[in-house]
Each structure stands twice: as C-alpha cells, then as structure tokens.
Amino acid sequence: MSESAKWYVVHTYSGYEKKVAEDIESAVKNRKLEELICDVKLPIQEVPEDNKKRETERNPYSGYVFVKMVMTDDTWYVVRNIRGVTGFVGPGSKPVPLTDDEVLALNVEQKKQIEVKFSVGDSVKVTAGPMEGFIGVVETIDLDTEKVTVLVSMFGRETPVELELGQVGTLY
C-alpha cells in the first residue's frame, strides 16, 4: 500500500452507498489500480431492532462512502465516474483528504466492535452451526480473528471446538 494514500469522502445518491462501494472495488480490480485505490469503506453500525434480540446494520453517514487512495487524475476519474457518485467532499471540485483526527472520529478504519459477554472459564451454549445446542467451557477467546475455542463434551471426552464469536452465547 502506498504511503501517500489518504482517506477521501465520496458523496453518493442516498441508498446507493453499497452499490457505489462495490462498483469502485470492481473498477479497481478491472483497471489494476490496487496500489492507488487501497480501500473502500461503508461505516456500518449494528443497532438493536425495536426491543428484539436481532440487530440490523445501518450506515450512520447516509450518502457517503470512504475511499483510501492516492489522488491522481486517473484515480479521481475512475471514482468520479462510478454510477451513483455525485462527487468528492471538498470545496468546488477539489477533493480534500480527511485529517488523521477525522479518520479517528469517524471510525473509518476501526473494525466492527464485538461485545463478548463471556470470558475464559465460563460455561457457554453453542447457538449456531453444527454444534448448536452443545454446552461447553470457554478455553480461549481471540478478538482479532473473532474466534473462540470451547471445550465440548462429545462421546465421553472433552473436545476443543473453534467457533465464530457469534456462534456462542451465555447460558443465562
């Protein structure tokens, strides 16, 4: 990744953010611009769905897509001419990169936060996947890979099973 790549905000038609992000990524691959256009982000937040256990995703910055790129005439042209893009954020037609403080404040580079309600040694229930319904003891939690290892009793022996964090829940 190029050191001079900066985050820019691309304005889109409302509701087109996901399609614009996909189209930018596709154009980058087709034109082999991976070194110049490094990343495309839609900041997504998980929000509770009206007093239900389920959560839905929502974009707190409706009408915007974040693009980490080296600004050149070519990269500007490629992004600017994606269907649904109305322009870059900045005065006139001059795109202005986000400052480091703005990148932090907008959580552009931050991964989705996962709340883990259990710790190593806790008894948990497997809530999804082929092991659904099994109860076991948490052996390890890896937040970077979003995996948890649970010791599950199968066929009379303790067997370590690696699961996604979302596949395990507390017993209560």
Image: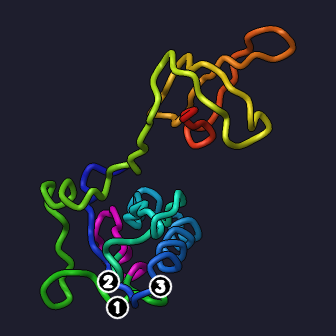
Question: Would you say residue 53 sits in the magenta stretch?
Answer: no
Mark 1 is on which residue type?
Answer: Thr
- Please name which of the two marks, 1 or 3, marks the residue nearer to the observer: 3
The image shows residue 128, relative to residue 125, as above or below, that is: below
**x, y (%) of residue 78?**
43, 79
Q: Which residue is mark 1?
A: 86
Tell me which residue sits at (53%, 77%) in the image: 23
Mark with earlier residue (2, 1):
2
Q: Which residue is mark 3?
A: 16
Name the spot of residue 9 as percent of width and height, x first. Answer: 28, 73
For residue 125, which numbered disc appears in the image?
Answer: none
The residue positioned 20% from the left and 53% from the top of the image is 104
Question: Which numbered disc flags the more N-terminal residue, 3 or 2?
Answer: 2
Labels 3 and 2 touching (C-beta < 8 A) = no
Give the quadrant of residue 125: top right
Of the two numbered discs 1 and 3 on the same chain, state the one appearing first in sequence: 3
Q: Which residue is mark 2?
A: 11
Q: Where does the image place residue 123, in percent across and percent down from the top left?
A: 57, 22
Q: Describe the element under mark 1 as helix, strand or loop.
A: strand
Q: Residues within 10 Å of mark 3 (few under 14, many from 20)?
A: some
Q: Amino acid at mark 3?
A: Tyr
Distance CA(mark 2)–CA(mark 1)? 6 Å
Q: Secondary structure at mark 2?
A: strand
Q: Residue at x 40, y 88 (%)?
A: 14
The residue stretch that appears in magenta: 65-79
Callout 2 crowding tier (Cα within 10 Å): few <14, some 14–19, many ≥20: many
Identify residue type, mark 2: His
At label 1, counting other C-alpha atoms closer than 10 Å, the crowd grade (few under 14, some 14-19, many 20 or more) is some
Point 57% across, 71% down: residue: 26
Q: How many marks?
A: 3
